[in-house]
Image (cartoon, rainbow, N blue to C red):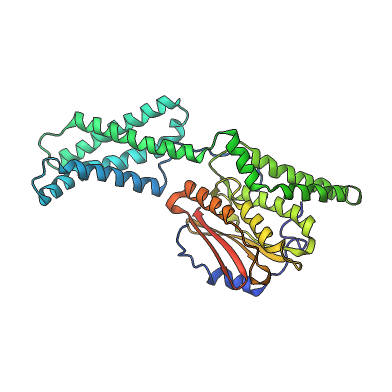
């Protein structure tokens, strides 16, 4: 495979590309080693390290506290005092439970499923006792130790149920679902075109034909691999490079690609096969409809704790072939399933250029 930075694949792009990169999508947009062999990270029901999970868990527990404070309250101010007292115990207990399961998730994931539930509720009971101790420190005369342990176990079981179904959504297991995902990612006519290109090269350029088939095999290997929660950005870039190497054989000089990659962003995590559909979308709507071709730019940049990924392509005649937006919707949904409120997604068309911009945690 050719190096993406070589003259064969990289070409100077219009000055509007650089202006578009910085002016069209400011950093405050709203949500939305390149080896492919390293082990993949699977979804976990104890994945409580995300900001969105923490916010939802705290909001849920505080809602329960607010409702519980209504029982026996003589009025609004009486309810407010009861709610404040309960918050003094429940909020620290909730944070302790979240920190504990986040820190111990590597060990908890090794347990059988029923042991995971048992461990999670026992940690919840311990967190409830911790919250009761906080109430005792606040001057509660008769600290309800047993009730606090039971409440902690019950609330933690309810939060675990939400995390369990979240993990199920992140890890599709059915073979039919995996085949449907494959069908949506690799279009049949792309396969036929690739095979035809390889056949045409067999006699004239056998080495190039072999490289095309190797790239195609790697695309299918990645699509058919066991479903996982995330892969590294470096793995996704390597896969996109293989895809563009295949399309370069088909389109020749009509396909002009520029890479601007930040090595410090390579370890950021993405859902598998997230970047390739964006690159394929750029080829489908930018290069394929145009007789003169189009330019595509893929860039990555790390800014502190955030990684910025941009896929930009020129559009023939200022307006490309209308699509259904299914690829972008799929990318957006899987991105938010993995990173929740820490992810941002934006797609915009301006001045004959279409850009998809992603922001993910580093």
The one nearer the camera, 342 or 32, is 32
Q: Is residue 346 above or below residue 55?
A: below
Q: Is residue 235 visible?
A: yes
Q: Is residue 132 above or below residue 219?
A: above
Q: Residue lying farthest left? A: 74
Q: Quadrant location of residue 301?
A: bottom right
Task: Name which residue lies at 33% across and 35% down.
Answer: 158
The one nearer the camera, 2 or 346, is 346
Left or right of 189 on screen, residue 97: left
Q: Position of residue 342 (x, y in %)?
A: 44, 53
Q: Is residue 39 visible?
A: no
Q: Is residue 314 above or below residue 90?
A: below
Task: Name which residue lies at 82% across and 51% down.
Answer: 197
Task: Name which residue lies at 59% across and 52% down.
Answer: 266
Q: Quadrant location of residue 5?
A: bottom right
Q: Position of residue 258 (x, y in %)?
A: 68, 63
Q: Position of residue 273 (x, y in %)?
A: 61, 47
The one nearer the camera, 251 or 82, is 251
Q: Residue lying farthest right? A: 203
Number of marks in the rendered image? 0
Task: Name which residue lies at 30% across and 44% down.
Answer: 60
Q: Position of residue 216 (x, y in %)?
A: 74, 45
């Amino acid at each position: 495979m050719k190096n993406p930075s070589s003259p064969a694949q990289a070409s100077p792009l219009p000055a509007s590309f650089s202006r578009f990169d910085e002016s069209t999508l400011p950093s405050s947009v709203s949500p939305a080693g390149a080896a492919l062999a390293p082990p993949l990270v699977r979804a976990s029901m104890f994945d409580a390290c995300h900001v969105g999970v923490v916010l939802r868990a705290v909001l849920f527990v505080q809602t329960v506290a607010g409702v519980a404070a209504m029982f026996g309250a003589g009025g609004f101010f009486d309810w407010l005092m009861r709610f404040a007292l309960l918050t003094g115990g429940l909020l620290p207990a909730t944070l302790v439970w979240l920190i504990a399961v986040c820190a111990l998730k590597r060990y908890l994931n090794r347990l059988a499923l029923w042991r995971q539930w048992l461990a999670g509720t026992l940690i919840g009971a311990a967190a409830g006792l911790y919250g009761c101790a906080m109430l005792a420190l606040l001057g509660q005369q008769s600290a309800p130790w047993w009730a606090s342990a039971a409440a902690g176990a019950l609330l933690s079981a309810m939060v675990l149920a939400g995390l369990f179904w979240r993990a199920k959504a992140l890890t599709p297991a059915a073979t039919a679902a995996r085949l449907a995902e494959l069908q949506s990612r690799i279009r049949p006519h792309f396969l036929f075109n690739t095979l035809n290109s390889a056949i045409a090269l067999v006699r004239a350029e056998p080495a190039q034909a072999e490289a095309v088939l190797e790239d195609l095999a790697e695309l299918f290997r990645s699509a058919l691999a066991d479903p996982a929660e995330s892969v590294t950005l470096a793995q996704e870039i390597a896969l996109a490079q293989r895809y563009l190497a295949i399309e370069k054989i088909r389109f020749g000089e009509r396909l002009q690609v520029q890479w601007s990659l930040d090595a410090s962003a390579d370890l950021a995590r993405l859902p598998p096969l997230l970047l390739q559909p964006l690159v394929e979308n750029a080829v489908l709507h930018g290069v394929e409809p145009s007789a003169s071709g189009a330019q595509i730019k893929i860039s990555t940049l790390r800014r502190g704790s955030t990684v910025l990924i941009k896929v930009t392509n020129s559009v023939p005649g200022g307006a490309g072939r209308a699509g259904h937006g299914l690829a972008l919707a799929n990318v957006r949904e899987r991105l938010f399933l993995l990173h929740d409120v820490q992810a941002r997604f934006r797609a915009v068309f301006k001045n004959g250029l279409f850009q998809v911009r992603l922001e993910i945690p580093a």
